[in-house]
Image: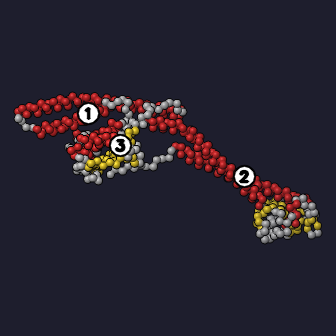
Amino acid sequence: MFQPTRSKGPYSLQTRLVLAFGVLLILFLGLAGFVLDRAFKESVAAAVEERLQLQVYALLGVAEPDEEGFFLPDLEEARFSQINSGLYGFILDAEGNEVWRSPSALDVNLEEANFMSQDVAPGQTVFGNMETPEQGSLAYADYGTYWSSLDQEFSFIVLESVEPTDAEIREFQSNLYLWFGGLALLLSIAQFLLLRWGLKPLQQLAMEVSSIEAGEKDQVEQGYPPELEAVSKNLNLLIKSERERQGRYRTTLGDLAHSLKTPLAVIAGIVDQVREKNQANGADGKTELLELDEQLERMNQIVSYQLKRATRSEKSRHLGLSIQVLPVVEKIINALQKVYLDKSVTVLRQLQEQAVFHGEESDLMELCGNLLDNAFKYCHGQIMVKVSNQDSRLIIEVEDDGDGIAEQDREWVLQRGTRGDTLKSGQGIGLAVTVDIVSSYKGEISIDKSELGGASIRVSFQV
């Protein structure tokens, strides 16, 4: 049994642009945030080094040698005099022996911190970081100097806790993330609104095309941006050429149907004359005449149907209005129950009220009429009609409890281009007309065995 399938559609143009600009925005803001964070850390580190260098110079300015090492009487920086203030000073000799420490550094143990004074040349400064058990992370500046009066080299070392600078960096990062997050949200909203505004002409064009499909408009209106102006003009030209082609098609069909009507009428008249002549002469040949009558009737059905199609109103469109299927089906069933009153056919219904057909009502009437007429004609007493919308498709299914259609004949009778006069005898023209209508609307048709025991014919159209 035919089951319609739908593949997942691609992302819309707006979704693609939103995703693309969103990724670009994330990359840009992420890179900008990384650069700003790195730049701020480097500026803070430079400020710490400059501050440490100034503290070293401050120690040098007040340092006085004495018998035990150095004496620093006046320390301008008060933190050198406060225990565990976060600022500590040391003076080491060339062998790394301590000759002075600030009062604030009484609890600082350089040996436990594994600090080794480097061989710093006089006038040079080495900066770095160290860990102490009590004070935690410290930044230091190691400055080498030569004291001429003592004829010795010394290292002036200043250490400062990095906790205040770390807190400053954390606060900056917090503010950076907050502002960049708000900026990203604001830019995302602005981007979405700008894209909607920029793509509005495309949405309007899509709405107009939908209106044309629904038969509400005749053509696409003008006034689009230059990028879409050519598209709208070409769409209008395409619609115009399609209508002209349909007009030529109707004219050709009408001419053909009219051309066939006359010879068919002549043949029918000759058959009547032959029948009357045979009756008058008592000759046989009833079987051949009946077969000829049947073929003439089928040819007349073909011509009548094509003539009706050809003479439709020029205002009709292949993409017509939305037609409610339920009233059409009920109308046909009521009519056929009167025609086949002697068979007392029971009709089972599974009809959705919201099911619609996008096209011409005459085509829907012709299609449902042929399917139901065949079901009434070949059933034993029961048929089932199903109409529903499933997965954006209109599905019409007619089943009967008759003898059905042989499996080997199902594909053959639905072959595209098969005409009514080449179908298996007994099936009539109805199925050929149905295939013709389904093909014209790009629909699908399949034949299977019915749950009732006979044939099940299923037709589906894209909604």
Disc nearest the viewer among 1 and 2: 1
Q: How far apart are the two marked residues, 2 and 3, measured between alpha carbons?
A: 73 Å
Return the residue at label 2. 39
- Residue 159 locus on image (x, y percent): 81, 62
- For the point 83% across and 69% down, the residue is 107
Of the residues shown, which amino acid type is indicated by label 1?
Ser
The residues tagged by marks 1 and 2 sit, at their Cα atoms, a distance apart of: 87 Å
**Image coloring type:** secondary structure
Q: Earlier in the sequence, mark 1 or mark 2?
A: 2
Disc 1, disc 2: CB below 8 Å?
A: no
On screen, residue 39 above or below 131: above
Rendered view: 436 above or below 125? above
Extreme left residue here? Answer: 281
Q: List the residue tagged with mark 1.
A: 304
Which circle, 2 or 3, is nearer the viewer? Answer: 3
What residue sits 38% from the left and 39% below the top?
323
Q: Name which residue type carries label 2.
A: Ala
Q: Which one is earlier in the sequence, the residue at label 2 or at label 3?
A: 2
